[in-house]
Image: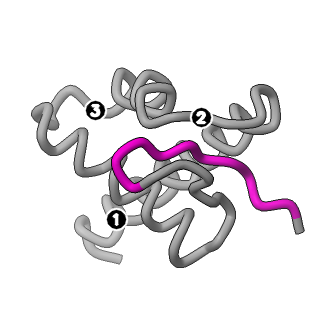
Amino acid sequence: ETKEEKERKKEQAFYEHYKKMILEYLDKYNNANKQDIDKLILDILPDILDENKKANKVRNLVYAMSKREKTIINTGTTRNPIWKKVWL
């Protein structure tokens, strides 16, 4: 296992943790707008990332959850998303 592979695995574990935090937030509050998710995740992302990279991470996270995994759904608009958990 290379150093890069170890780093990727570690990053993936954090990614899964952030997703879990978003789902737990939605369990508790029923929905979240972009600001809610930003508040929840941005501050705990590694300081090595600049603000743009942090914003991209959050955007990618939400995209993965809504488009690929289908664990959350936007009940708002594209400009003002309101995210809700998909109940299976």
Residue 34: image quadrant is top left
| Spatial separation of the CA atoms under disc 3 and disc 1 | 14 Å
Q: Is residue 33 above or below residue 20?
A: above
The label on residue 8 is 1
User: Which callout, 3 or 1, points to the residue nearer the camera?
Assistant: 3
How far apart are the two marked residues, 1 and 2, measured between alpha carbons? 28 Å
Which amino acid type corresponds to the residue marked 3 in the rendered image?
Answer: Pro
Q: Which residue is mark 2?
A: 32
Residue 72 image position (x, y, % from top left): 65, 58
To which quarter of the image does residue 78 belong? bottom left
Determine contact: label 1, label 2, CB under 8 Å. no
Q: Pick the quarter of the image with the N terminus.
A: bottom left
Q: Vertically, is 79 above or below 88?
A: above
Q: What amino acid is found at the position of numbered circle 2 in the picture? A: Ala
Tell me which amino acid carries mark 1.
Arg
N-terminal-most mark, 1 or 2: 1
Numbered mark located on residue 34 in the image: none
User: In terms of depth relative to the viewer, which is nearer, 35 or 60?
Assistant: 35
Residue drawn at point x = 62 percent, y = 53 percent = 75
Marked residue nearer the N-terminal end (3 or 2): 2
Q: Which residue is mark 3?
A: 46
- Mark pair 3, 2: CA separation: 23 Å
Residue at the farthest right position: 88
Question: Magenta residues?
Answer: 78-87
Label 3 secondary element: loop
Q: Nearer the viewer, mark 1 or mark 2?
A: 2
Point out residue 84 in the picture as x, y percentages from the top left corner: 69, 48
Mark 1 is surrounded, within 10 Å at the Cα level, by few (under 14), some (14 to 19) or many (20 or more) other residues, namely few
Q: In this rendered view, identify the residue nearer to me: 63 or 4.
A: 63
Which residue sits at x=54%, y=48%?
76
Answer left or right for 85 relative to 39.
Answer: right
- Disc 3 or 1, which lies upstream in sequence? 1
